[in-house]
Image: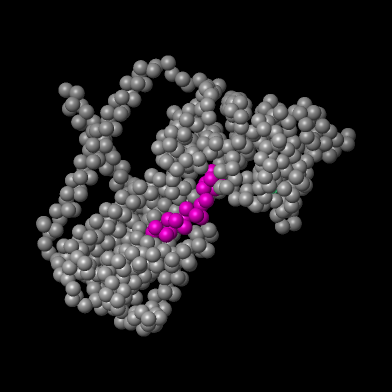
Amino acid sequence: MTGKPITGTGDNNTPYETDDAFLDRSALARQVVKDTINKVLLGAVLILVLALPAVITSPTWLHIIVLIFFYAYLTTSWNMVGGFAGVLPLGHAVFLGIGAYTSTVLSLQYGISPWLGMFVGGILAVAAGMVIGLPTLKMRGAYFALATIAFAEGVRVMVENIEYLGPFKLNGPRGLQIPPLNIGWGDFMFSSKVPYYYIILVMLLIILFLTWAVSRSKLGYYLTAGGEEPEAAQALGVNVSRAKVIAMALSCFFTALAGTFYAQFSLFIHPKSTISLDISFEIAFIALIGGRGSIAGPVLGALLLRPVSDLSRIYFGDILPGMHLVIYGVVLILVMIYQPRGLQEPLTRIYDRVVNRMAAGFIKGGDK
Amino acid sequence: MNLLELKDVTKQFGGLTAVDRLSLSMGKGEILGVIGPNGAGKSTAFNCIAGVFPPTKGEVVFDGQVINGQKPWDLCKKGIARTFQIVKPFASKSVLYNVTVGAFATTSGRAEAEAKAIEVLKLLNFDDKKDTKSSDLTIADRKRLEIARALATEPRLLLLDEVMAGLRPAEVDEMVEIIRFLREQGITILVIEHIMRAIMALSDRIVVIHFGKKIAEGTPEKVASDENVIKAYLGDEYGVS
Ligand SMILES: Nc1ncnc2c1ncn2[C@@H]1O[C@H](COP(=O)(O)OP(=O)(O)OP(=O)(O)O)[C@@H](O)[C@H]1O
Ligand SMILES: [Mg+2]
């Protein structure tokens, strides 16, 4: 389109070009400084997490940290559909289970490396996700949420009650034990926690990068638009259900990869430890409390809530199993009342303020 | 050739006939006004054109092609854009974000889409608000955002559903100026409006709808003096006495 801009009745073209240019330049300088500070801080965090196993040598602590990363990864995968697309999946553990069982069965029965089985599991999870998603993603939120719960529970009950699925041995409620025979990278099996730490760290970094890339892409814009105002989005050329289906496929795929990780990390899987509603709900809780639809939310949520879950298991594990979900519920209610967009919002605001102050300090210091 | 043609378009909701055998046509570059009392079926006719739902009967022809039953997102790519009577901004996002969603209709790259969005915002003298969250906008700016988003999809036919409702007189004048300017850019525009002063000043022709039926059509002057139209607006008693 060409042509002169319209100047409406109220003409707000200022004649103070030079002032504007000056303001622009100082704003630009501040932005550059802020970007640099952000990059330096990000680098520092990266170095910290890379060096962490050198400092923390206790396997118990490493185990807890691995599980924090694991949940951060799971929730970030969930966030692709549950956050950006504005729907509420409540049965994501089923994709975790599909990933765990697929790679484990392939490696136990056919000697296929879990690294390969991981991707087979991912593809199967996408197929399962389409079975639930294609008919329900078009509908309003509650139907989709209910369908995901029903599907996940159905699969769990089924797996608990069959020994074999065709030629594949699932072992019902007893689950599958992975004998630690072949230790090494090729078999995705280690006697130390450290390799697991680095594997889940890299997986987390990849999924975070991907989320960032998606949120800045056409797909990300379409998901947000379709989630907020579907009719308006459609009028602007957005095929809302198609965008949601793509997001669902991505989410299922990456969730299943975590299943293989979990199987190799614990070397024992059974229906209750993989396909349980507990896990499905915990993921959703972490996302909602941390802040769904944001990149930092799932990570913050996992960092803050996983310790709660571990502590509650230590102190209430025998008397009140599931106590952590009760605590989550209370926290969720409080967060939804005071910070409906999750804890990431106030935390991001504080972070921004600190960075702004630092940037101002640097610029002043530089002028002297 | 006409850009848009409705042939005996009927839309029923259960027993209610919201649009009743409506026919009209629009040449390229024309501004056609649609008026009628509340509940006359104006927005429903828009929805039939924009693909929100297919007409119960009749044909909608766009650029020589029957488009009945096609989806809104496909029609958008063919060159039909619309605004909503009740504005629907992506409320948590900035003005620029909102318009960029529209710009993605013609490109896949974000940088390109954003550049296009800024171009549109400049065109509407709206770029100073590009970073404002859309839920913080005044009603006039929300209407303007509706238009900006629609424009970013590069439409050939623009459907405007009461973009002046709720505006102050000065803002109405500005909106009239914007719509005229868009027509100069070669866009064909169908306008629903209740504000007579604006629609009279703006339209090349006006179609009057009452209970879903077309009761008059012609130049603004002709329509304004039409007996049926006066009756429809002021009630039967007025026409009889
Ligand atoms: N989706 C729908 N389902 C059922 N009835 C509907 C629907 N949309 C509109 N109607 C009915 O169709 C009739 C025409 O409504 P429409 O919104 O098209 O009127 P309008 O001319 O745009 O009125 P207004 O000037 O108030 O916007 C009304 O009686 C309305 O209640
Ligand atoms: Mg209407």
Residue B233: x %, y % from top left: 77, 37
Residue A364 in picture, x, y percent from top left: 20, 27
Q: Residue at x 44, y 75 (%)?
A: A154
What stretch of residues is rendered in magenta? A232-251
Vertical side of A307 occupied by B172: above or below:
above
Where does the N terminus of chain B fall, quadrant-wise? top right
Residue A328: percent from left, percent from top: 33, 62
Q: Residue at x 51, y 55 (%)?
A: A241
Rendered residue at 31%/24% (across/down): A25
Q: Quadrant of residue A55?
A: bottom left
Is any atom of residue A296 visible in this view? no
Q: Nearer the viewer, residue B5 or B14?
A: B5
Main secondary structure along the magenta-highlighted residues: helix
Q: Is residue B99 magenta?
A: no
Q: Residue at x 27, y 56 (%)?
A: A204
Q: Is residue B81 above or below residue A164?
A: above
**Does any portion of residue B170 appear in the rendered image?**
yes
